[in-house]
Amino acid sequence: MTDRDEFVTWVQSALRDAEVAVHNGDAGPRRAIWSRNDPVTVLGAWKNATGQQELDELFAHLAESFSDCTSYEFELLEAEVRGDTAYTVGFEHTSASVNGVPRTYTLRATQIYRREDGEWKVAHRHGSAPPE
């Protein structure tokens, strides 16, 4: 199995599970897959964050807002691994309640990862609504 294959397997398991958890109101698994080493950044569809404190606040806010995730799919368009750095580009298709209101939406998402002590960690995320 290549580095890329192992990375994509991780994306399709640990990353997916973390996203389902945050969309069910639990930020713990998502926070666990994010780097504890700065810099970390989010240019989010709703809010932005830079640094550990803002990241913790953002994830707590998202967990408070989301509940009742009925589906989450990451449509991976591309992934690449170069040494201890990787990225993914794709579409996130989600059905969950946002502040108690059921919603179905799609975000385009680009993420950058670092391999730290042998484990992949997210270091940057950019998520936004796709153009119409």
Image (cartoon, rainbow, N blue to C red):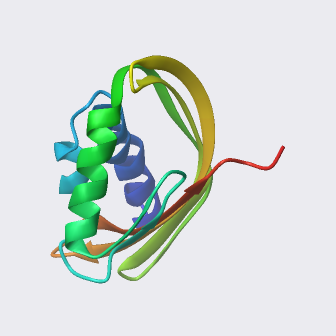
Rendered location of residue 125, percent (x, y) = 46, 64
Q: Is residue 124 visible?
A: yes
Q: Is residue 34 visible?
A: no
Residue 67 percent location from the top left of the image: 33, 23
Q: Nearer the viewer, residue 8 or 47?
A: 47
Residue 70, quarter of picture? top left
Residue drawn at (31%, 55%), measured in percent from left and top?
A: 58
Task: Indicate left or right for 54 with 107 as reference.
Answer: left
Foreground pick, 18 / 50: 50
Image quadrant holding the C terminus, namely top right
Residue drawn at (28%, 38%), measured in percent from left and top?
Answer: 63
Quick check: 55 above or below 63?
below
Please say if 23 is above or below 113.
above
Q: Position of residue 55 (x, y in %)?
A: 28, 63
Image quarter hosting the N terminus: bottom left
Instruction: Place residue 107 in its image quadrant.
Output: top right
Task: Name the side, left or right, on which 131 lies relative to 58.
Answer: right
Q: Provide residue 91's location: percent of width, then percent of height.
A: 62, 45
Q: Is residue 68 above or below residue 35?
A: above
